[in-house]
Amino acid sequence: MEIAPSSDSSLQLLESADGKQMRHRFAEAPSDNTDPPLLTAIEHLAWGRNSAGCYPHRRCGCQYARIDPESLSTNSASFQIFGSALESMVDFPRITDAQKLVKFHVYHIAWHHNCFHGPTFLQQCEVFWASGRCDHPLWIALYFAVLSCTINSIQNSHKLRSQVDVNLDAMQTTQQLFSAMVQTMYSSHFLNNLSIYSVQAVVISTEVAHNLGLSQLNATLFNAAVRIAECLGLHKIKDHPQIPAPNRDQWEERIEREVGRRIWCQMIIQDHFAIPFTDTYSISPMHYSTNRPINADDYNLVEMPASTPTISTYVRVLVNLAALMPDLCDGLGPMNKRKSTREQYERILQVDQKMRTIVQNIPPFLLRPDKAKEAQIPWLRIARRSLAITAAEKIIMVHRPFLFHSFNDAKYTHTRRTCVAAAMTILREHETIVEEDDLSIWTHSAFAITAAVILCFEFYSIVEEIDSAKKELYRDAVLTARDRLASRHSDVLAQRGVALVDAIFISEGSSLGALEPIPGMPIDFNRILANFATLSKLNPHADADDMSITKLLGSTPEGSGSAGFDADEMAMAWNQEIDFDAWFNGVFNTLQTPPL
Ligand SMILES: [Zn+2]
């Protein structure tokens, strides 16, 4: 290996084994000997890997360095789709349709994932529509992900379909656009041709993958995306200095760093909220240094006070809730040696308290209507409703390890009452969104299913005598939610939810017409699973091949049936008993008055 002289003393030109010159800017590697050791950084040259943390690779010498002016630009247009192999593989929507859908996405949907810089993405689309050119073949995957997600969000709303003014029946479906995204990634070898665009595509496609019944594919793609992001250094993005009058180069770098932080933030959210599926997480809070995205709008990226809504506000709130989850998971003890049931439950009650504190500190414009702000920001109202649903579901998520037990065991009454109240909150908000014919976010169907299942269990619970008025209320809430889910087109997740509700009713000895539980019988988990499998086979739209319904039903904490567990002691441990419904509606203080 030959070290050539350089005018920049920090920049060394190294020659690799294949004779290709590789530049490595040692100044980019931290000067201390811990992050990472310089020796490791050098050794990684032999591995063809990078550990210097130099994202967005504008002035580094690693293998992802963008040295020439063309590849530095976020609009290099260096790839031409016309005549490419990719063009013959995938079917592109008409440009006039795509223009309307992309613009709608930027102004009405992007707040939910916050994974790109709207003006940059629009500019890239304009170049693509005009010339067939884009930065990189994998940018096409991002393009398909955005289109697929947009159609998924509007296709069940008459109001939005007419507002966007695209004949969705005459164009590619969400499924076809999602498949085109996956095909683009495979054909462009996304696993070794690493690009930020694949990461964006995967993370945004989460918005539609679950509704398509492709949760498992999403999960594997997502974890690949985490590793791609780490290889690119998204977990170690250094803060960018505020430059008063940046030149074009500095402005583009600023955008790239901020987009990197936004994507990483969304990955933390998706990773940590997926913990109940596998009881693991992939992004360790100890192992990244990238800060949260700033509360700034796209046009100037200037940090605003938390009281000002920006495109980054929603995810900045959500990541605070997500950040509680690894701690909750670890707090239950190692998987092969869980802590005592009492300790586990105490942990859950502690996290419940922390979560309520975070919810109470959410900016007011996301908790209650603000006509002035809503007139300026088209997505603010649906973001507020979505957050109410999500925050209620996260309280359920905290209690999930004891949720199923709570319907059969009076020791966990606090969990049962909290989750039932949260479920009612979710279904009330879900009903309002559907009545307002508003935007669909994938979480709406998903969490309405969770809520309906919880209310079914409450209906059949044997731990407490529930009066007939409440039973009537729960039954109506479940049946109307079931009808809303059943009426959704192109939503496999919703159809599975319908099958699940039906399976519970059938399993527990009732039909939809005559909902009477069998007295004294605990809920039969296995019978529900068997009935769900049967119903799913009968309903081709609810194919259960990759459905993890145990996630919906809750896991079984080890040793939860252990003797010597004192209910009174537990009641004392929970010394701040607060009725969830009253508390939650006090926070989201203009939601409808709880009927209970
Ligand atoms: Zn680099």
Image (spheres, rainbow, N blue to C red):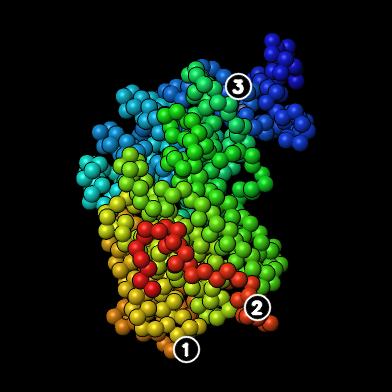
Residue 80: image quadrant is: top left
Q: Which mark is residue 520?
A: 1
The N terminus is located in which quarter?
top right
Residue 480 in percent (x, y) is at 30, 69
Q: Left or right? Give the position of 153 relative to 559.
A: left
The C terminus is located in which quarter?
bottom left
In this orientation, which residue lies closer to the viewer: 146 or 333? 333
Q: Left or right? Give the position of 183 relative to 487.
A: right
Q: Nearer the viewer, mark 2 or mark 1?
A: 2
Residue 48 in percent (x, y) is at 66, 31
Residue 6: image quadrant is: top right
Q: Is residue 377 visible?
A: yes
Q: Which badge, 2 or 1, is on the more N-terminal residue?
A: 1
Q: Which badge, 2 or 3, is on the more N-terminal residue?
A: 3
In this orientation, which residue lies closer to the viewer: 399 or 39? 399
Q: CA distance from mark 1 to mark 3?
A: 70 Å
What amino acid type is highlighted by mark number 1? Gly
Residue, disc 2? 569
The answer to whether residue 467 is above or below residue 202 is below
**Element type at mark 2:** helix
Q: Is residue 82 visible?
A: no
Mark 2 within 8 Å of ligand 1, using the beta carbon: no
Q: Nearer the viewer, mark 2 or mark 3?
A: 2
Q: Which mark is residue 59?
A: 3
Residue that appears at 36% across and 60% down: 591
